[in-house]
Image (spheres, helix red, strand yellow):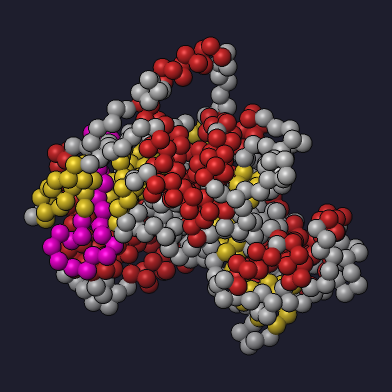
Amino acid sequence: MIKTNVIINDINIPVYCLDTVVIGTGCAGYNCADWLYDLGRRDFAIITEGINMGTSRNTGSDKQTYYKLSLASDGSDSVREMADTLFSGGSVNGDTALIEAACSVKGFMKLATLGVPFPVNPYGEYVGYKTDHDPRQRATSAGPLTSKYMTQCLEKSVMGKGITIFDNMQAVKILTADNKVCGLLCVDTLYSGGEGLGLTLFAVNNVVLATGGPAGVYFTSVYPESQTGASGLALEIGAQGCNMHEWQYGLASTKFRWNVSGTYQQVLPKYIAVDKDGNEREFLLDYFDDPKKALDMVFLKGYQWPFDVRKVFGSSMIDIIVHHEIFDLGNRVYMDFRSEPTGLENGFEGLSDETYNYLKNSNALMKLPIERLAKMNRKAIELYADHDIDLYTEPLEVSVCAQHNNGGIAVDMNWQSNIPGLYVVGEAAGTFGTYRPGGSALNSTQVGSMRAAEHIAFTTDEASGNADTLYKATDSIADVIESIQSMLNNIGESNVVKLREDAQKLMSGCAAHIRQEGSMESTMDYLKERIKKFDEEIRISNPIEICHALKNRDILIAQLAVLSAIKKVSSEIGSKGSGLVTDKNGEVIMDSLSDFSFRPGKEGYEDRLLITQLSGDGFDCQFKPIRPMPKGDDWFENVWNEYIERTKRVYK
């Protein structure tokens, strides 16, 4: 690592010259850095806003799922079969689907070796279970905190290798020269005033963006509050977005942000609504003629947790009803584990065979949802207790929340974007399509970050970035300097939080799982205006807020890209995947389910991706064909010779 400095707009800025920087300290970021080291690289560093922030360390579900090739003796499987499952989700590139299947065992076994406690039977088999959109039993779990364990084990490996980490440093601008990456501009998140404006520059050849999905897009969200994403960094320099309209939304608790999937639903909690006067009612009874039918739909929410327009008259009706109760009727909605729901007064007879047999096989045919939950998944209770929520004594407030972006920045088979030198891994990468098996996101963090590290190591010679090239990006650096100076010259009552929440609420209102086409145009105009007037409108109360303010701009860019993609799909296709499109008046649900209506989607788009790219003051969205599933030459001698040639920089 070489340290020097540059002077831009009379600001003396320290510069670190490195070959590569990895932005992010979640499962993907740590894994990429760990692989870079193992592949012989040394001239690189990790940059993070905060080591303990982010989705990987701070999120999960009842038993957070990791999806990989079947490894138990009675689970016949193959790489091609798993690739076909990933590919069949629709709007997925065949090469990345095949790679995520082929490398799933390699990534999984590394984690197991590092100490992630994935369960095995007495014979050492990693037995699995069936998750959503999974035709087999490829899923496994280390419990509610699987991704946290992954992060901790990878962090331990990175720390043990002495890899440099720049903590409390927020990336605010990726710098390019001659249409390729040349640097990164960061701001100290602890900057409280003085010379230098808290700026640091990195002259680099490669940037690996491992910052998670664009979590700041929505107000109603289950992303941890520490997670905002940084997709705007890539989008504003011309990186293409892919399928940015494809999201996962589902039921989640709001006091403590956590998915209430799996066992939380399968134990059949009572759903209650409380109006503004404090009146309580078991509201599902108002929508289903048979209370046992309602309970069967609640059960199915366990492993059909993501909202899905194909299931609006099945399990996803629960999401629609909850949304209606909260946003149309103004009620607060709770899952109550303390008392039995209507329909179980005389036992479990009359439930569907699937519901009954699951509870029976789990030895959970007992009274009260909390007792069933304690029997089937005690850790799910302990998790909330650790956050001062006692499911034995209080109901759990829930809503339908944004949880995961199945789109992201478009990448090739090495997880490199259309900007040379910019790699995007983890949820920030747009490798998922309309539907994906539960847990495939964790697999993707490991496979994509490994592939990025391998491509850097196999195809480039390690060399520190050149500080002189940063002068080619002077205009971009100067823009950030001027923005910060404008904030410091107008310190007053802060509006950072209000401006962020105003935009987030508009997005949740018209462009989440319920998509109101009539409101999209005005929201797009609003976002463009906020970006255009950002410097003159933003107000901070002290210098420590600079990073939060600059994050607002990044979120606005991501929101505009996401909304542009959603508007394109809503107008051309209609309801699709996780997005239910209403008519121009925004009417979706009436007082009776029999009156429920929405605009159905057109078929025939499964073989296309939606590419979103900056154009003027907005984003252009175009459908493009998917990359097909590869049919390679598997003759061993040919593969062997090609591999030797491809990896000769590392394996001499």
Q: Is residue 3 visible?
A: yes
Asked if residue 280 is positioned above or below residue 106 in the image, the reply reads: below
- Does residue 56 appear to the left or right of 204 in the view shown? right
Quadrant of the rendering where the N terminus is positioned: top left
Give the farthest residue toward the bottom: 277
- Picture residue at 20% right of the left edge, 56% below the top: 199
Q: Position of residue 611 (x, y in %)?
A: 45, 40
Residue 629, magenta (yes or no): no
Q: Residue 176 magenta-drawn?
A: yes
> Which residue occupies 22% across, 69% down?
192
* Quadrant housing residue 416: top left
What residue range appears in magenta? 175-199
Looking at the image, residue 361 lies above or below residue 202: below
Q: Is residue 437 rendered to the left or right of residue 449? A: right
Residue 32, given in percent of the width and then of the height, sits at 42, 41
Question: For the point 88% across and 74% down, which residue is it?
Answer: 345
Q: Residue 340: where, in percent of width, then height?
A: 80, 74
Side of 255 relative to 302 (left or right): left
Could you say which quadrant of the image residue 522 lies in? bottom left
Residue extending farthest to the left is 10
Residue 517 appears in the rendering: no
Task: Give the side of residue 38 with respect to residue 198, left or right.
Answer: right
Relative to 137, residue 503 above or below: below
User: Residue 165, how many percent across, how many down?
Assistant: 32, 51
Seen from the viewer's position, the closer of residues 422 and 190 is: 190
Which sits in the foreground, 401 or 276? 401
Q: Give the mark count.
A: 0
Q: Residue at x 91, y 72 (%)?
A: 346
- Image quarter (top left, top right, bottom left or bottom right) of the C terminus: top left
